[in-house]
Amino acid sequence: VVLNEPRDGYRVITLNRPERLNAFNPAMHAALRQALDAAAADESCRALILTGAGRGFCAGQDLSDRDFRAGEIPDLSATLDTLYNPLVRQLRDLPMPVVCAVNGVAAGAGANIALACDIVLAARSARFIQAFARIGLVPDSGGTWLLPRLVGRARARALALLAEPVPAPQAEAWGMIWRAVEDESLMAEAHQLAAHLAVQPTAGLALIKQALDAAETNDLDAQLDLERDLQGRAGRSPDYAEGVAAFLEKRPPRFSGR
Ligand code: LHQ
């Protein structure tokens, strides 16, 4: 249900239940978590691409799953606690950049998991739907936190309350994603980006992610202190030494990722 393809310096993780537009069931959650764990444990893996098989990226929770059928009273808090929330935390805490290649519709939790990635590329024909309100639910997987930060309060409210689709070019114009690209070139662009990131100072990039995440809740004073601490660590890294040496010697750097 999840494909894990190693490339030179990075991995492509593909949600693979195309007949259900890659909707999440427990097996897909487990396989995705395992693929992310394996990537995090592999020092030679310095970037990730997350994408979907077939015409969709991810339609969120599989609503045909037995546990979510009408008639049984589901414990959705438990579902979030055990499946979606750990996934979002894991994505956010990965010590390498994650490029999301949104190949088609991203709905419900599928939209918010895409938006939780570091750099979001989307095919022009893709769309993002906060589908939750259509079925009486609340945007989850970090959506209520992330959306207002990405697109502002007014758009976040309307998107969540109306559950209207946002086409990828609109998402780019609003700053919800990095770029919308031609459908045919989506994967080529994602690979180019991941291959570039895979030879950058990975440990430094992980510190950048940490700083930007903390900035969402820190005040300026706390953030200045954090920048001081993280820069201290970055300054002791072999890749900083290599970056400066390469600059002074007017040659391309060879970063180890450490
Ligand atoms: C699906 C799904 C799907 C099953 C398409 N499930 N089959 C967290 C915690 C706990 C519980 C609940 O949820 C959550 C978080 C959530 O994610 S809640 C939101 C769940 N997702 C949705 O409400 C989206 C439901 N899907 C749709 O609205 C549409 O399918 C979209 C807009 C994504 C795509 O529309 P179309 O391009 O017209 O495709 P389609 O509707 O024809 O779907 C293709 C097939 O995929 C179809 O099956 P079929 O056998 O008829 O070909 C759909 O039933 C199936 N599918 N989404 N979430």
Image: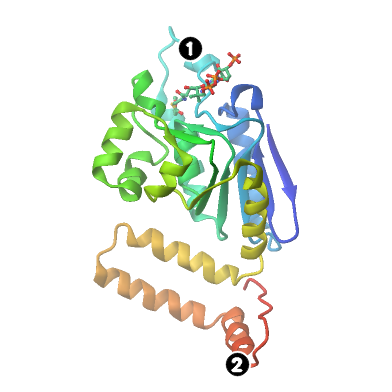
**Element assignment for label 2:** helix
Q: Residue at x 50, y 17 (%)?
A: 67
- Residue 82 visible in this rendered orientation of the protein: no
Q: Quadrant of the N terminus?
A: top right
* Residue 106, position as x, y percentages in the image: 50, 34
Mark linked to residue 92: none
* Position of residue 185 in the picture relative to residue 63 (left or right): right
Closest to the observer, 176 or 217: 176
The residue that label 1 is drawn on is 69
- Of mark 2 and mark 1, the one earlier in the sequence is 1
Q: Quadrant of residue 244?
A: bottom right
Task: For the residues labelled 2 and 1, say whether their Cβ atoms are less than 8 Å apart.
Answer: no
* Residue 154, position as x, y percentages in the image: 24, 41
Closest to the observer, 238 or 162: 162
Q: Quadrant of residue 33?
A: top right
The residue that label 2 is drawn on is 248
Q: Residue at x 44, y 30 (%)?
A: 108
Closest to the observer, 49 or 192: 192
Q: Is residue 212 above or below residue 114?
A: below
Q: Farthest residue in the top direction?
A: 71
Q: Is mark 2 within 8 Å of ligand 1?
A: no
Q: Quadrant of the C terminus?
A: bottom right
Label 2: few (<14), some or many (≥20) within 10 Å? few
Kind of residue at badge 1: Arg
Q: Is residue 185 above or below residue 208?
A: above
**Element assignment for label 1:** loop
Q: CA distance from mark 2 to mark 1?
A: 63 Å
Kind of residue at badge 2: Leu
